[in-house]
Amino acid sequence: MVQAKGLKKSFGNMVALRGIDLAVPAGSVLGVLGPNGAGKTTTINCLTTLLKPDAGWAAIAGYDVVKQPAAVRALIGVTGQFAAVDEELTARENLILFGRLLRLSARQAAHRATELLEQFDLIEASKRRVKEFSGGMRRRLDLAASIVAEPLVLFLDEPTTGLDPRSRRQLWDMVRALQARGITILLTTQYLEEADELADRIVVIDRGTVIAEGTADDLKDRVGGTFCELELADPKDEMQVRQLLADLGDLQGRGSTLTLPAPDGVATLSEVVQRVSATGIVLADISLRRPSLDDVFFALTGHATGDEAS
Amino acid sequence: MNSADLHSKAQSLVKLRHESGINRAISDSLLIAWRNLIRLSRTPAVIVSVLLFPILFFSGFLLAFERLMSFQGIDYVQYLVPIITLQAMFFTAMGSAVTLAKDIKTGMLQRCRAMPISRAAVLGGLILAYLVRAIAATIILLTFAHLYGFRFQTSFIAILCYLVLTLLFTTTAVAGYAVFALVLRQPDLVNSLLIVPYAPLLLLSTGFSPVENFPQWLQPIVQVQPVSHTAAALRALVNGTELLVPLFWSLVWLIGLLIAFSLIAVRLYQRVS
């Protein structure tokens, strides 16, 4: 449904995209994950006809974004990083305006506005001006405005950046509901958790290139599978435990917290428990841990997700 | 949905939501104008300034210069109303520039650009909405001036022509200020530089004072610029003096600039990010 090959874009001397490839099959959610400055917004702007790529090719449902931009705009909905709705208008007026602009009749637009206000939990605030809205309410209205006339493809640029956890959960539920209706979604995020929660597949980009691609599980596997994490009741036991488990793998960590690669999962864990308890050493805690996407990002880029790409 | 269904759905959406053609441009402009008018009606400060500013300037200039001008044999009430009308139109256009700059900042323009709406609709909707404001401002000013003894010495048709020329001037000014806002983009910057085109065009014109009162070297510039010609044409429509020459040059200027500004504005609009 969405395809891009070798997208490149520079702004003066600043190279934003160095050749982005991606594909979003119909009805699926692609998460584009990367830190600030990685090129996420530029990618979205190229795909939504807001920017002309310098090189490369992209299409929505087979329509070329450079050669047939008007056709592309007829098929997409876009929610940008800033909730772009009119502050002086009420929530209902905003939705009616966008509905009318998308060729709904006056009656259809009014009907659709009510429907969306209910769905997005804004019905009580529908007559208030948007400037009185909280950040979460604005984002919800923005999302509602993007789907007034059901698009085939929805682009969400960092839909939850700056939202409190409750509003974020709410927005996630709404995105899931849209996916369930068959809308193809491309969302960018700097939150690994968000990509993990919402996306069928994830593309990790950094400094304008795709550095990894796959499902969340694929990516986690690339860092090495599961770890067994053990916490000693008494840090003095560290040396003894190290000797005890030396043949099981490379033991990381120091003091009371140690981690061990656990390719066999539970089997490794129970082996550790048996060996340690046989010597009478007390464990405060032991668990199996899948790597988080943060670990993945660090492993792939060598810098943490919070870092600005320089 | 299988891929054949998707394909035909895509095709029908592309057909339904096409964005080209004059009908589309008009209907989309009207929708954007409706939205701009709602905004205007909810900004009380703007309404007050529309009503009040032209009246303040009219009264102020009259008090300061009426006697002085009478020594030159000029009935200043009759002389002044046209340029105060154009000044009010400048204020109107400045208001439109601020609105546009805000829309760039909030991302509203981006959203419109990613929607299948006419590329001319944002400018068209801005012009239409501000024409409504311009009509209100002109009527209020003319009514107030009437109390000071201002009278059209001509015909009803001349009054209509006065309005039409005023609105053409507004259209060109809004398009010009749209280019201004699309180049500068930051609302603060736009706001603080609003008077840069306005002040010289208005003050260095024959609107407030005849060309003989300017320094010799400046007279050619004062005489040739669009505000002078338009003010002269409006004065002719008020007082029944020689109309054709100033009207001709005014139309050449205003229509020429309008075409140029509109083309540039629509171009710039498509690059806003």
Image: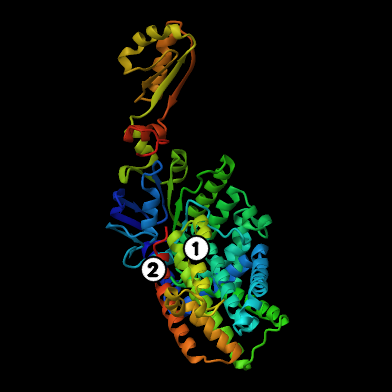
Please determine whether, in this image, residue B226 is positioned above or below residue A233: below
Mark 2 packing: few (<14 Cα in 10 Å), some, or many (20+)? some
Measuring from the top left, give residue A306's x and y in whole percent: 42, 36
Q: Chain of mark 2?
A: B
Between disc 2 and disc 1, the foreground one is 2
Measuring from the top left, give residue A276's x and y in whole percent: 42, 10
Tell me the residue that label 1 is attached to. A150
Please determine whether, in this image, residue A271 is positioned above or below residue A9: above
Q: Is residue A114 left or right of residue B27?
A: right
* Residue nearest the observer in this picture, A275 or A13: A13
Measuring from the top left, give residue B194's x and y in whole percent: 52, 63
Disc 2 versus disc 1: distance between alpha carbons? 29 Å
Tell me the residue that label 2 is attached to. B267
Which quarter of the figure is the N terminus of chain A placed in? bottom left
Measuring from the top left, give residue A222's x and y in whole percent: 32, 34
| Snapshot quadrant of residue B14 | bottom left
Q: Give the residue type that dot 2 points to.
A: Arg
Q: Give the residue type that dot 1 points to.
A: Glu
Q: Chain of mark 1?
A: A
Which residue is depicted at the point 52% across and 91% down?
Answer: B243
Helix, strand or loop for disc 1:
loop
